[in-house]
C-alpha cells in the first residue's frame, strides 16, 4: 500500500488565548447596536419622514451590504476613515431627530439618514469582523453575534413599544454606537479623555432629543401598531384653537376646541368630501345606520343625528383611548355610538348583515396598506352589510399609491356603479384635499344623489383585480 502522509501541525493545534471578557462583550453589543439602528431608522423613515411604500427596503439593503463589505470583501472596511466619519454621522442623525432642527427636503432627509446609518452599521460590522477570534473560539463568536442581533431586534421591536411613548430606541441606538466607538478607539490612544468628552456631549444631546420629541404634544403614546401623538394649537377660549391626531407623519384628524365649533367636520371629512356628501345627501331617509372602518378622531360621528347609529371598526385600542380622551366627536354626537375592537374584515365576516345606509372605509392614508380591506372579496363583504340602495365610501387619498383603479376593477367585476369625488384644500386650511370613491349597487343610486366633483374612475394599464390570493403594490406606485 501507499505510504501514509503525515499531517503537518495546523494552526488550530497551537495554543490560543481565550478572548478577554471585554472583547466578548463587544461581540454581543456591536450586532445589537446595528440591529437596533436598523429597526429604528426603518420606523423613522417610513413613519415620520415619508410614508413611502417599500422604503423599508433601503435601510435593510444597507444593513446587509455592510455585513458583506465587512466579512466577505477583505479590505473594504477602512477603519480610520469610518471612525473619522462615525461621530459626525451619529451627531447628524441626532440633530435631524431634534424637533427644533431645520429639516431639508424629504429626498435629502432620506439620503442623509441612509448615509449616516450606513457609516454606523459599517463601523459595527467592520469592528466585529476585526475581532474575529482564533478558530477554536468561532462557535462562541458566531453565537454572540446572532444573540446580539436578536437582542437588538427584541429591544427595538418588543421592549421599546412597551417602555417608551415615542421612538426613543433611535437616540438610544445612536448613543450606544457612540459609546462603542469610544470604547474601541480608547485602546492605546493618548487622547481618550478628549474623545470621551465629545461622546458625553453627544449623549447629553440625544437625551435632549428624547425629551423634546414628546414635548409640545399634549399626549404621546405607543403600542404594537405605532406611535400616536396629539398636538394642540392655541388655547381655549380662542376660536381658532384645535387639536390634531398624528400617527407618525400622517394627520388622522383635527377638531376645534371651541364648544360651538366642535361638531364641525374637518380635514378629509368636510361636507364637500365624498363621505360628507354621501352622509349629507342621505340625511332625509329617516334614522340611518352608518358604518366606519377606521376611527381616527371619530370625525364622521359629527354627521350623526338623533335616531342614527354610527358603528366604528377599529383595530388599535390606543386610537379608541385617544379619541375618547382628547377629542369629543364621540361624546358630542347625537347618534347612538358603537365601537368594535379588532380587524374590521374578520369582525364583519362574523356578523349578520348590518343594513348600513353608508359604509365608510378609511384605512389607507399611510404606507401600511391593509390589502385585505381592498380586495374583491372585501368589497363583496361590504355590500353584504349595506342596504340595497346603500353607498360604500372608500377613502383612497394617498401621496404614493394610486388606489382608485384598484377599487374600480373590483367594483366593475362585481357589477357595481362607482364614481370618484375629488376635493381640493380649502382656502382656510380646515378641509384637506381628498379622494373618495363612492360605490353603489346600481348607477341610479349614484345618479340620484347630486355629488359635486364626481367623475368616472381612472383605469391603469396592466393592473389586475386584487383578490385574497393576489395583490401588487408595485403596480400602483405613482
Image (cartoon, rainbow, N blue to C red):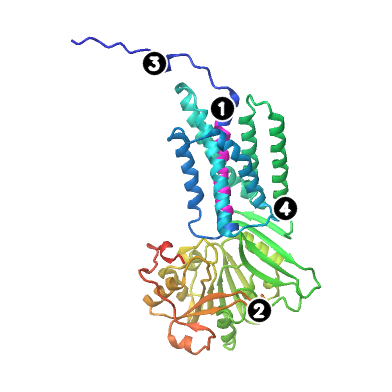
Magenta residue span:
27-44
Which mark lies nearer to you, 2 or 4?
Answer: 2
Q: Which residue is mark 3?
A: 10
Which disc, if any, is residue 212? 4
Who comes first in sequence, dot 4 or dot 3? 3
Which disc, if any, is residue 336? none
Q: Which residue is mark 1?
A: 24
Cα–Cα gap, marks 2 and 4 = 32 Å
Who comes first in sequence, dot 2 or dot 4? 4
Residue 341's spot in the image, x, y percent? 58, 63
Q: Residue at point 70% right, 37% down? A: 198
Residue 259's spot in the image, x, y percent? 76, 76
Closer to us: 387 or 406: 406
Which mark lies nearer to you, 1 or 3?
Answer: 3
Magenta span: predominant SS is: helix
Cα–Cα gap, marks 4 and 3 = 58 Å
Who comes first in sequence, dot 1 or dot 4? 1
Figure quadrant of the N terminus: top left
Which disc, if any, is residue 427? 2
**Contact between labelled residues 1 and 2, with CB atoms less than 8 Å apart:** no
Closer to us: 401 or 253: 401
Q: Residues within 10 Å of mark 1 (few under 14, many from 20)?
A: some
Amino acid at each position: 500500500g501507499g505510504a501514509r502522509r503525515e499531517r503537518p501541525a495546523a494552526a488550530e493545534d497551537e495554543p490560543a488565548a481565550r478572548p478577554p471578557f471585554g472583547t466578548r462583550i463587544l461581540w454581543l453589543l456591536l450586532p445589537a447596536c446595528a440591529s437596533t439602528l436598523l429597526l429604528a431608522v426603518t420606523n423613522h423613515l417610513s413613519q415620520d419622514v415619508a410614508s413611502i411604500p417599500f422604503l423599508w427596503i433601503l435601510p435593510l439593503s444597507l444593513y446587509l451590504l455592510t455585513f458583506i463589505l465587512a466579512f466577505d470583501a477583505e479590505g473594504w472596511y477602512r477603519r480610520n476613515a469610518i471612525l473619522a466619519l462615525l461621530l459626525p454621522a451619529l451627531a447628524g442623525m441626532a440633530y435631524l431627530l431634534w424637533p427644533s432642527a431645520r429639516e431639508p427636503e424629504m429626498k435629502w432627509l432620506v439620503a442623509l439618514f441612509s448615509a449616516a446609518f450606513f457609516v454606523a452599521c459599517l463601523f459595527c460590522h467592520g469592528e466585529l469582523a476585526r475581532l474575529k477570534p482564533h478558530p477554536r473560539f468561532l462557535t462562541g463568536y458566531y453565537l454572540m453575534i446572532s444573540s446580539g442581533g436578536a437582542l437588538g431586534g427584541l429591544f427595538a421591536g418588543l421592549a421599546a413599544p412597551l417602555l417608551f411613548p415615542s421612538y426613543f430606541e433611535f437616540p438610544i441606538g445612536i448613543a450606544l454606537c457612540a459609546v462603542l466607538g469610544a470604547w474601541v478607539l480608547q485602546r492605546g490612544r493618548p487622547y481618550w479623555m478628549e474623545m470621551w468628552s465629545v461622546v458625553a456631549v453627544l449623549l447629553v444631546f440625544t437625551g435632549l432629543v428624547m425629551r423634546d420629541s414628546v414635548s409640545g404634544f399634549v399626549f404621546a403614546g405607543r403600542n404594537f401598531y405605532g406611535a400616536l401623538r396629539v398636538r394642540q394649537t392655541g388655547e381655549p377660549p380662542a376660536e381658532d384653537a384645535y387639536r390634531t391626531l398624528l400617527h407618525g407623519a400622517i394627520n388622522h384628524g383635527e377638531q376645534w376646541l371651541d364648544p360651538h365649533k366642535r361638531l364641525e367636520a374637518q380635514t378629509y371629512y368636510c361636507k364637500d368630501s365624498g363621505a360628507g356628501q354621501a352622509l349629507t345627501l342621505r340625511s332625509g331617509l329617516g334614522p340611518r345606520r352608518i358604518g366606519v372602518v377606521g376611527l381616527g378622531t371619530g370625525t364622521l360621528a359629527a354627521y350623526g343625528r338623533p335616531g342614527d347609529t354610527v358603528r366604528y371598526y377599529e383595530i388599535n385600542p390606543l386610537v379608541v383611548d385617544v379619541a375618547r380622551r382628547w377629542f369629543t366627536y364621540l361624546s358630542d354626537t347625537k347618534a347612538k355610538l358603537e365601537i368594535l375592537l379588532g380587524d374590521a374584515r374578520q369582525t364583519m365576516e362574523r356578523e349578520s348583515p348590518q343594513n348600513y345606509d353608508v359604509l365608510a372605509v378609511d384605512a389607507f392614508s399611510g404606507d401600511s396598506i391593509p390589502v385585505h380591506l381592498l380586495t374583491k372579496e372585501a368589497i363583496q363583504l361590504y355590500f353584504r352589510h349595506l342596504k340595497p340602495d346603500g353607498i360604500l365610501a372608500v377613502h383612497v387619498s394617498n401621496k404614493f399609491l394610486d388606489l382608485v383603479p384598484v377599487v374600480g376593477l373590483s367594483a366593475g367585476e362585481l357589477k357595481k356603479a362607482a364614481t370618484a369625488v375629488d376635493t381640493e384644500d380649502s382656502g382656510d386650511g380646515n378641509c384637506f384635499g381628498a379622494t373618495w370613491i363612492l360605490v353603489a349597487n346600481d348607477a341610479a343610486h349614484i345618479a340620484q344623489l347630486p355629488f359635486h366633483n364626481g367623475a368616472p374612475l381612472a383605469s391603469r394599464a396592466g393592473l389586475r383585480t386584487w383578490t385574497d390570493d393576489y395583490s401588487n403594490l408595485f403596480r400602483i406606485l405613482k
